[in-house]
Amino acid sequence: MSHDDFPTDRPAVVTCGLPYANGDLHIGHLRTYVSGDAYARALETLGQETAFVSGSDMHGTPVAVNAEKEGVSPEEFALDHHETYAGTFPKFNVEFDNYGHTHEPTNTELTREIVRTLDEAGHVYEKEIQVAYDPTDDQWLPDRYVEGTCPYCGEQARGDECDEGCGRHLEPGEIEDPVSAISGNPAEYRERTHKFFRVSEFEDYLTGFLDRLEGTSNAKNQPREWIENGLQDWCITRDMDWGIDYPGEDGDDLVLYVWVDAPIEYVASTKQYTERVGADTFDWETVWKANAPDADDPAAADAETWAGRDTGEIVHIIGRDIIQHHTVFWPSMLRAAGYNEPRAVMASGFVNLDGAAFSTSRDRAVWADEYLDEGFDPDLVRYYLTTTGGFQQDVDFSWEKFQERVNGELVGTLGNFAYRSLLFAARNYGGTPDATTSEEVASRIEEAVEDFEAAVNDYSLKRAGDAAVALAGFGNEYIQRNEPWNLTDDDPDRAEQVIYDCVQVAKAVAVLAAPILPGKAQRLWEQLGEDGSVHDASLEACLESPPGDFGEPDELFEKIEDDRVEELSAEMEASAGPADDGEADDGEADGESADDAEDEPAPDLEPIADDRISFEDFQDLDIRVGEIEAAEPIEGADDLARLEVDIGVERRQIVAGIKQLHDLDELAGTRAVIVANLEKAELFGVESNGMLLAAGEDADILTTHGDSAPGTKVR
């Protein structure tokens, strides 16, 4: 692994958190998969050798429970969902180099080999814990096989969570009147010996690992709090039949916890890719095993031990609900087994539906198949999911917002520029005029290429997408400013120059847009008369001369009409009803969601304060609109960031507790609401001159609906 800018001379592997084989996909699930595909494509556009791999997570309690309800085996149940996912992803232009599943022999063998290594090295020990048991049927019961009454609120609950009531996590034995969810028999709790992985031994290593880790700030910062609070060893076995058996004779009919074998599928899937294409094309061991520090080397916590090693570049793209698994458990397992560590973890925010959580149980979702059945192109939702806000921020989907982004940026900017430019070129010159790229346009294309490269190296898909659309916006302004239709008679040489420039810009837009809009970019590539695939083009192609001949284009994007949006919104509301009670889905057992399948619970709202303030007291507050110009973490502080904010009349430095909740690199240009006349304070040695207003535990930054200028007073 290097920390050189991409592209490097080392092969890269991009992975996505495994979808759990236990339900249908909706567009909330798709965010990490289309983002993973887009990031892998972007790396390849830079010239980085890249494999994009994932697989279905087949094991765990929910699969076994739901398979039993349907009267089929867990394997049959999970395989059915796996095959559905494998067929759905390509429909959204998500093209894995290898898509496997955790029940395949490759993953089973690798998992048992790695766990055996951990055990033999002394990283695993036995401990007795409380486990539910059905004495009538003589059967041990994982937590999700237990139902009863919550001791806190009295509602129906599962063995590990009060899912119908207060939402509390329940420890083994806390649930009252427990019964088996399988037989209905009364259950009891008994001592049972399980296997534990000594995660606590890796504190020093993990601290160094997080110092080296790249990606989104939430993935880098949130784990530090867990480490500072003291790492707990990790129970890696379960009492059930469905899963990978613990290796060795002392396994005692235990299976491995799903979060042991799920991430190992990243390695197994890469290995399967190598077996298919050959090690000369892509060598999985170079990425995952070659030149890793010795498993027992205590110096592996130091950056110098990892620097310059000829290994691979591993990038994990996940939902934020599984940061802990990928930045604490997984790197500890890799380290103990003598494998290479990830270079980066990109953790996305959640996707909400019109301001509320997706709820699959209430059919409050935009299902993947239904989206396609409505006739929408997959690239439209890819664009929306990857470029709406920073990657670690939550995305709110509504048909109105979807229409606004599509009509404004794809139809009105990118599509409009490509169509008007190529149509004029085809009708007047039969293709590209006889000219060369002007200095102004070449410079603007080079700037867009630099923006794209910087975005990929900053793990920002939004900025990568913005580079392409902004270049198309420049093209629209350029053609409008130069009016070639008025030059064809009076200054034909100048007209040819302008249109040549526009065709060159269109070619560059196709290359830069290809990772996020793979289908539409390919169509634009073909309209330009280019051969082959735009996905084989490098950034150098942006300034290579376009073909001389091409025909009249068709329009890349179709406007979404208001009546269509009204119809879709009404259908969604009729099928699901308003999300006014905060209901969320059951989610996955033991947090076993291999990605963002679990809905967020309703917020625990504070009561309204009884004490009132006068209007005059409120008037004393000087609340202003500000624009964040820069944001950076404060060294040594877990939560604090230093902001530079333009409040119109002056520039202020403000300290805010948003370090772990926002991608600081994405905040520049954000309009925010500021209390400007708060007394100055000093936090971690940094002066704060004002207060940033934000809502809730996630620090949802308050902004304005319109475009109020910095300095505007909030009344």
Image: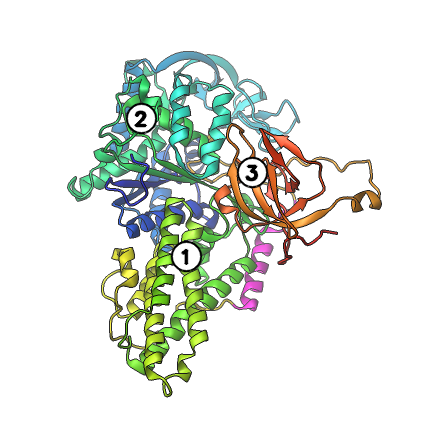
Q: Tags 3 and 2 in contact by the CB under 8 Å rule?
A: no
* Residue 155 location (% of width, % of height): 64, 29
Q: Which residue is identified by label 1?
A: 467
Can residue 310 be seen by looking at this rendering?
A: yes
The residue lying at 31 percent from left, 16 percent from top is 119
Q: Is residue 309 left or right of residue 453?
A: left
Q: Are marks 3 and 1 in contact (CB under 8 Å)?
A: no
Q: Position of residue 106 (x, y in %)?
A: 24, 33
Can you identify the residue that label 2 sits on? 304
310 horizontally vs 462: left or right: left
The secondary structure type at the circle numbered 2 is helix
**Image disc number at residue 317:** none
User: Which mark, residue 642?
Assistant: 3
* C-alpha separation, residue under disc 3 versus residue under disc 1: 27 Å
Residue 576: percent from the left, percent from the top? 58, 51
Name the kind of residue labelled 1 in the image: Ala
Q: Earlier in the sequence, mark 2 or mark 1?
A: 2
Asked whether 366 falls inside the magenta stretch, the response is: no
> 155 and 711: which one is in front?
711
Q: Which of label 3 and label 1 is nearer to you?
A: 3
Left or right: residue 364 compared with residue 610: left
Range of residues picked out in magenta: 561-580
Residue in front for this viewpoint, 211 or 69: 211
Q: Nearer the viewer, residue 264 or 346?
A: 346
Instruction: Spot the residue most to the bottom.
Output: 489
Q: What's the residue type where badge 2 is placed?
A: Glu
Circle 2 packing at 10 Å, graded few (<14), some (14-19), many (20+), is few
Q: Amino acid at mark 3?
A: Arg
Q: Is residue 575 magenta?
A: yes
Q: Secondary structure at mark 1?
A: helix
